[in-house]
Amino acid sequence: MTINEIQDELIDDFSFFDDWMAKYEYIIQLGKELPLIDDRYKTDHYLIKGCQSKVWLHADHQDGRVIFTADSDAIITKGLVGLMVKVLSGHAPDQIANSNLYFIDEIGLKEHLSPTRANGLLSMVKQMKLYAVALNAKA
Amino acid sequence: MERTAVLERFDVNNVRKDFPILTRTVNGKPLVYLDNGATTQKPRQVIDAIAHYYTQLNSNVHRGVHHLSQLATDAFEVTRRKLKPFINAAHEHEIVLTKGTTESINLVATCYGKAFLHAGDEIIISTMEHHSNIVPWQIVCEERGAVLKVVPINEAGELDMAAYRSMLSDRTKMVAITYVSNALGTVNPVKEIIDLAHASGAAVLVDAAQAIQHLPIDVQALDVDFLVFSGHKMYGPTGIGILYGKEKWLNAMPPYQGGGEMIKEVTFAKTTYNELPFKYEAGTPNIEAGICLAHAIDYIQEIGLDQIARHEHELLEYATRRLLEIPGLRIIGTAKEKSSVVSFLLDGVHPYDVGVILDKLGVAVRTGHHCTQPLMDRYGIPGTVRASIAVYNTTEDIDALIAGVERAAAMLR
């Protein structure tokens, strides 16, 4: 599936939730399915520091695709990280770098990506794209 | 007799009517505002005064001879006049108006540092200080070659007074301490701290940002050298802060910034400085906030700080008791003397997650390290969930908080 196909599928999934609780329970579930970062990368070097919760992110280049693994110390942040990884992981670097993440708005999670949010998610999306740009330049 | 009448008149539902924002909804739920430690909401009296300022008074202060400038100047100086009895300062000119508590502390650290700090001198702060009462002292210590010493706390969040006593010496030049901890709610024994510091020849700055809106303060009875606080945490506008300083210190220290207002005469050869308090008020101040703070002071005094403290303390005790009924909930900060703040953690749950769920339920709390990272490190935690109480909060607000925390616990564990 392309990045946009995955986004469209997520928009469809989220359209079934009629209240915020179901939505957040789904996000928490996504966090549990997140491909976890190897413990040896859970260091300050891979840390994206939000004001409150922490995110660790690692990118690996395999057969022309970028594989992301990650973790967070807060469970909702971890779920949101899981969403981003689900959308962006496994694609070619140029596709990631040029992606337009319209699904965030559509599923009503924009508030988590505003610069004032304390979870570091905005920095994480930037970092994912930076990894992709760097890997693209190397390739 | 009169007192009883006043007590009977206090009705939180009447108080709430003064705060228009409390009727709004958040995420479809009635707003439950428990982030008063960050900033308080504003009563109609203050909001109306802001509109009145811009429709009737707007003009620069202390400069113009024209009518509006005089009106604005008079209104601005009314605030200073009202602050004097509010904290029982000996003189109006001991009250310097700044941007906020942070600027007030930076002013003292910088100017006191220039005048009185030398290599090897010591400054004492405590583990529970806000970053605003740590970083300015670190900067000045680095500049002057002085040493920063930190009074530890016990597990309850109370200062280790024996350690404090042992730190004081003739090298101590300044003790900078918070009156009420923003993260724990601890009320520190500032009178004792001041007396001990003075016995060692040190000056004392008390950070009253979390105290001024909760308990009566008398700077002369405390004999404090500097007292700092902010307008926006006491039902007043944002952008105005207060620095009370004893006349002898304010006269002895050099100015903070150069510019308009703070000068007496400027030539390219030499500038002489204005008298107190204008020496420390360079540039156009936040006139609107300065003027409207007077209405917040009136508002507090009309209800009375004793009454406010009593109401808030009842709610604090109620919140503490109800929170402790939640399994796996731990309160951070269990000092004997506390005011208006309850900080807590759910076992195994990140405070950020609790904050997100409470927000969805319309409950505004603060989560995170509360600008007290060294304090969080002391407890070995990433942060807390903090509910902070003001005069308009109710037992229903606390009930909404408890229901929200219970729901968060069910979802997040």
Image (cartoon, grey):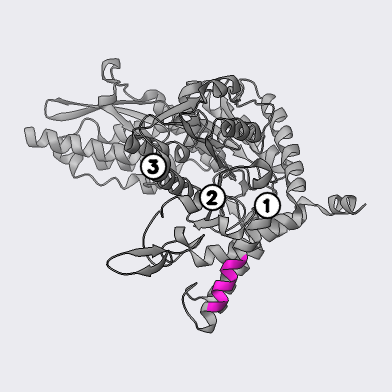
Q: Which of the 4 image quarters holds residue B135?
A: top left
Residue sitting at the far left: A139
Amino acid on which disc 3 is placed: Asp
Q: Residues within 10 Å of mark 2 (few under 14, many from 20)?
A: few
Chain on which label 2 sits? B
Q: What residue type is labelled 1?
A: Asn
Q: Mark 1 lies on which chain?
A: B
The residue range painted magenta reads: B70-78
* Residue B344 horizontal/vertical position (percent): 58, 28
Give the distance between the C-alpha atoms of the residues marked 3 and 2, in whole angstroms: 70 Å
Which mark's residue is nearer the viewer, 3 or 1?
1
| Left or right: residue B317 compared with residue B1 | left
Residue A12 is tagged as 3
The disc placed on residue B3 is none
Instruction: Check if mark 3 and mark 1 are on a common chain.
Output: no
Residue A21 appears in the picture as rendered: no
- In the rendered structure, the answer to whether residue B408 lies left or right of residue A83 reads right
* Prevailing SS of the magenta stretch: helix
Residue B394, placed above or below residue B346 = below
Residue at numbered disc 1:
B88
Name the quadrant containing residue A39.
Answer: top left
Q: Is residue A80 left or right of residue B223?
A: left
Label 2 belongs to which residue? B248
Mark 2 or mark 1: which is in front? 2
Residue at 65%, 63% in the rendered image: B295
Q: What element carries label 3?
A: helix
Which residue is located at x 41 percent, y 25 percent? A73
Say which of marks 3 and 2 sits in front: 2
Secondary structure under badge 2? helix
